Amino acid sequence: MRTVVAAFLCLLSLPTGAREQPKAKPKWVLAWSDEFNAPPGTPVDSQKWTTETGGNGWGNNELEYYTTSTRNARQEHGSLVIEAIREPHTGADGVQRSYTSARLKTQGKFSQAYGRFEARIKMPYGKGIWPAFWMLGDDVESLGWPRCGEIDIVENLGSEPSIAHGTIHGPGYSGDRGIGSPFTLPGGQRLSDKFHVFAVEWEPEEIRFYVDDNLYVTRRPADLPAGTHWVYDHPFFILLNLAVGGNWPGNPDNTTKFPQKMLVDYVRVYRRP
């Protein structure tokens, strides 16, 4: 009984709202993480992330210009804030856009084949708002897309506030032919109401998609169209971005409020022992 009471008192001594620190999950070992705990206003860690720039539509007719400004991506109160702002912007390349936002990647800094990749995210909302946590094969520069492979751990269309989409793209099954499945929160909950954990567990010849540890779809080579290939057998790097407009979500309208914030509590990657 004394041991039980001591353990209970120890729990009571923890600060209210203290955040759980990264720890090994059953069958997984933590390999890489970013907890975004720097002082408010600090840029993302340049040893872990590259901040991409540009406003060329990114192959999807998107409307934003991605910048390196801390107005669009910064650490704040234990989270990464990616903020989409409605404002006129002209890039160094002369491209003019009416929105700014941020797109981050670990390319050249971290990549891994297989494991559990997860992030705890509070989504933005509104028509034309398109946040994503995803991965690309690290041979994208040599092979190009979609031969390198793409794993969309989660995408959300702001006009579908309860639905998370998980998708794989490869040669012969990319773009609007990507192989995807939705997960809908129960009871009319919205992904913007609170933080949720989005993850994939990636093994040779299998990728499992989760929302809050709810497994909602598993992808295997047998799911691919005839004559196409499973390209998920080499390291992938991580991306986080908040797009505005595009072919899939459509463009913002007069109901869309700005600014919009995608909050990322952490990104963690695990591997098998």
Image (cartoon, helix red, strand yellow):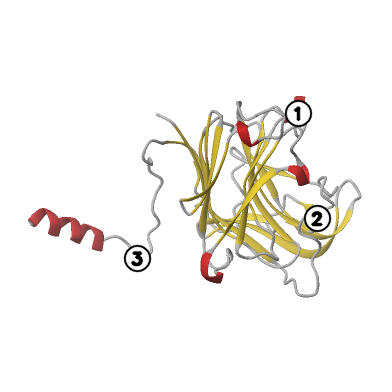
| Closest to the observer, 271 or 81 | 271
Q: Is mark 1 on a helix, strand or loop?
A: helix
- Work out how far the residue at label 2 is from the one at label 1, CA to CA, in angstroms: 24 Å
Query: Which image quadrant for residue 149?
Result: top right
Tag nearer the camera, 3 or 2: 2
Q: What element carries label 3?
A: loop
| Closest to the observer, 88 or 147 | 147
Q: Looking at the image, which residue sits at the far left?
A: 1
- Work out how far the residue at label 3 is from the one at label 1, CA to CA, in angstroms: 47 Å
- Find disc 3 in the rendering and name its residue: 16
Tag nearer the camera, 3 or 1: 1
Q: Earlier in the sequence, mark 2 or mark 1?
A: 1
Residue 246 got which mark?
A: 2
Q: Please say if 52 is above or below 212.
A: above
Residue 213 got which mark?
A: none
State the image coordinates of residue 169 (x, y, percent, origin top left). 70, 38
- Give the amino acid at mark 1: Glu
- Find disc 1 in the rendering and name its residue: 141
Instruction: State left or right for residue 70 relative to residue 91.
Output: left
- Give the amino acid at mark 2: Gly
Q: Which of marks 3 and 1 is nearer the N terminus?
A: 3
Q: Residues within 10 Å of mark 3 (few under 14, many from 20)?
A: few
Q: Residues within 10 Å of mark 2 (few under 14, many from 20)?
A: many
| Closest to the observer, 185 or 55 | 185
